[in-house]
Amino acid sequence: MSLIDINKRMQEESGFIPPILRQNIITGDWIVIAPGRSRRPDDFIHPKMEATKSSGKCPFCVGSKGYKENEIVVNHGDIYVIENKFPAFYEKRSATRSYYPEDAFYRERPSVGQHEVVIIKDHDTGLTKLSKSLTSEMFWIILERYRKMKEDDQVVSITAIYNHGPEAGASIDHPHAQIFASGIVANTVNREMDGAERYFGINGVCVYCDIIKHERSEKSRIVYQNDYFLAFAPFASRYPFETWVIPKRHQSQFENSSRNEIDEFADAATEVLHRLEKVLPGLSLNMYVRTLPVIMNDCGYYHWYLEIAPRLTTFGGFEMGSGVIINIVPPEKAAEYLKK
Ligand SMILES: [Zn+2]
Ligand SMILES: [Zn+2]
């Protein structure tokens, strides 16, 4: 059965159109085409924060109608995990790895993998106000999902993300993280691995370990540190108040962290998030874990970290056209604010 046949059948059966991957023939970057349930053009023009708690329609609030429809993957303490209703990566297996449509000119792949939502039960406490222990619980559950998802031999890399606030693309006003497990290497990680491998070839050290060493002696961009993690504003920050939280010892894979390391990680991340909320009340932000593809095992030149990207400005034509970002807050200044 071809991908087109599968799509057609899925659509007929449930109204759901499975996502597919398309490769940019020029850059090699992957794109997910995920129509989900067909939308009207209207949906794009007036994006709305659907379903708040006050409307009584929040699908993530425990006991709500939406909640009851979900298949719960994990239910533990203050958190539960479900499969995403409109997955970007879908577990349907396919016979071949790639398709070459249009006389084999382009390359497509089935968007295999999994897409889960990690939900904090309390509707009212947003990311930047979560306690250290709950943040640690959340990251530990995410880590356990990584370990589970990598057992699937189709899964190549996993990306955990958190969208906080409307400017960060959070369409549901209930605190939740998401885990994307896919059959491809994330474009960003792919590029970073290239650069890091080159640096390793020239200097014989992990570039991230080198950055940590440098930032600790330079001090001006450090926001916070504990025994295991360093939080700092990167030298070439793309976003105002961009902050990285990175393990001090060399470690290429997030999912290999110990429980104690996750506690320390949550301590550093929460510290940064609380300070951001204090300096910029009500801000929107995205955060994501960059980590080695799960099919690889410990790598000398790649080093996992969390990137926190506040969404205080939007990208204009120059940023989109040139890929060169104009950041109006020097990272040294951002660190100064966040340090206090
Ligand atoms: Zn809710
Ligand atoms: Zn390193």
Image (tube, rainbow, N blue to C red):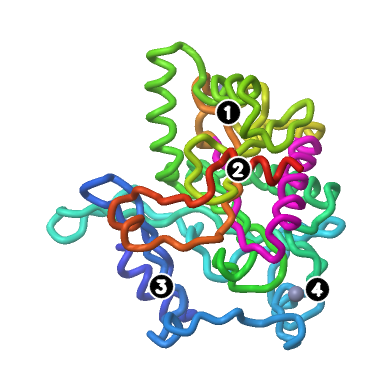
| Nearer the camera: disc 1 or disc 4 | 1
Query: Does the rendering let one see residue 298?
Result: no
Residue on which the image places disc 1 = 252
1 or 3: mark nearer the eye: 1
Three-letter code for the amino acid on which mark 1 is drawn: Ser
Residue 35's tag is 3
Judge whether residue 23 is colored magenta.
no
Amino acid type, callout 2: Lys
Q: Residue at x 33, y 50 (%)?
A: 323
Query: What is the spatial separation of the Cα atoms under label 1 and label 4, in whole angstroms?
Result: 36 Å
Residue 193 versus residue 169: which sits nearer the camera?
A: 169
Judge left or right: residue 254 versus residue 108. Answer: right
Residue 333: which numbered mark, if any?
A: 2
Note whether ligand 2 is within 8 Å of mark 1. Answer: yes
**Secondary structure beneath disc 3?**
loop
| Image quadrant containing the C terminus | top right
Quarter of the image for residue 208 reads top right
Quarter of the rendered structure image containing ligand 2: top right
